[in-house]
Image (tube, rainbow, N blue to C red):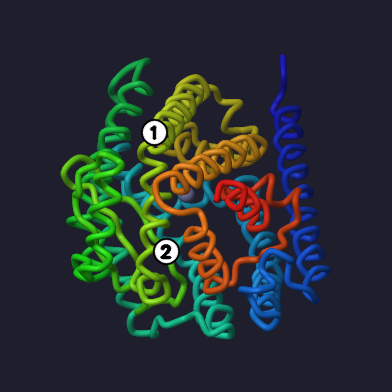
Amino acid sequence: MQTTSEYTYLFISFLALRTLIELYLKIRQRQHIIKHRSMVPTQFQQTISLADHQKAADYNVTRINSSFFFYLLDLALLLAWTYGGGLNYLDYLLHPLNLSPLHQGVLYLFSFSLISAIIDLPQTLYATFVIEKKFGFNKTTPKLFMLDLLKGVILFAVLATPLLYSLLFIFDFMGNLWWIYAWAFLAIFQLIMVWLYPSLIAPWFNKFAPLNDTEITDKISNLLDRCKLKNSGIFTMDASKRSSHGDAYFTGLGKNKRIVFFDTLISTLSPNEIVAVLAHELGHYKKKHILQHLIISSSSSLLGFFILGQVHHIPLFFSTHGVINNVNYLALLLFVLISPVYTFFITPLFSFLSRKNEFAADRFASENSNAQDLIAALTKLYKDNASTLTPDPLYSAIYHSHPPAQIRIEKLLKLS
Ligand SMILES: [Zn+2]
């Protein structure tokens, strides 16, 4: 029979391996960007200045430098919560309240989330008010930051209370197949959230206005007709109040579906470039990438619940990771904490799939709008977001959901 210490060695080995790989990749990415700092890649020499290229390099290197510290801090925290006895100690602190297991569980998970959020706060503050500010991207005022934080806490409390009570109730009282019910409940909850997000949640943080530039809306209507899609609403969002980074996204479900452009993007792209970006987003929809993503994420979540359903009553599962009290809410939290150590090893697969979809959406955009317009739009996005044009190929293969800039533009040039 396996013993606690054997499984502990297994977990620690996976954790050590993941840490070494991730630190090695960070170092590679940093070196690669520095090495290519002195020259703009050929395809971008007409469109991106050396000064902008170097600013992007410095911005990315600064972010990597600070990420070393926060990465190791997160690692130390994981060890402190598990083998350091943090999870046990928090449980011990709440015991004198003499609550029923269900209330105790919800209070425990709330307390854990609150402590984690407080520990994460310096990292967010540093990223926003030091790094983003240094490179001129940050537009968030301390007042807006505090307001966002407060809204985030309220939203979390409102959503997490019914969610945690229901999940723990299912876990505690629904028998051996609880994990299927819990999965189904969570999937429905998520679908409702996606449906409600555009009309109920997002407007609390940003202002949305219908896009009313007729030149742009006419071109968009033409595109939607060509793609046989109904126009369910095109909006601009006042993203510029927080950051000068630009983006566009597709959100919602059914009648609540909408296309959102950051105002920062509308102000820098020409109407034809906006249409090309939209065509790319529509490509994801038409090629069923959104559905595919939904299926993959819900089957991974089913697999996760299945595994949790098998291990949660095994004392070895707890003792292997330094946890004393064998209760359901601790099993749930412990599982959420330790599974990324293993799932890290399949991230390259998901990144690969995502990049494949990006190429397909680019192809769709070049067929239904114009590849040159998309190239121009992407170049502006790279420049405005100070994305690196020269990522390390291995780093990019493992983490990046989008293809490296040079390869993406090369493929688009062939389509134009
Ligand atoms: Zn895309």
Query: Which disc is residue 288 wearing?
Result: 1
Report the front residue among 383 and 290: 383
Instruction: Tell me which amino acid carries mark 2.
Output: Glu
| Residue at the spot 75% in from the left edge and 51% down from the top edge | 393
Quadrant of the drawing holding the N terminus: top right
Query: Which disc is residue 273 wearing?
Result: 2
Whether disc 1's CB lies below 8 Å from ligand 1 is answered no
Q: In this view, does 387 lie above or below 320?
A: below
> In the displayed structure, does residue 318 sit left or right of residue 152?
right
Residue 21: x and y in percent read 77, 47
Residue 11: x and y in percent read 70, 35
Q: Distance between the residues labelled 1 and 2?
A: 23 Å
| Residue at the spot 56% in from the left edge and 25% down from the top edge | 315
Q: Is residue 382 above or below residue 325?
A: below
Query: Which disc is residue 187 wearing?
Result: none
| Residue at the spot 66% in from the left edge and 54% down from the top edge | 75
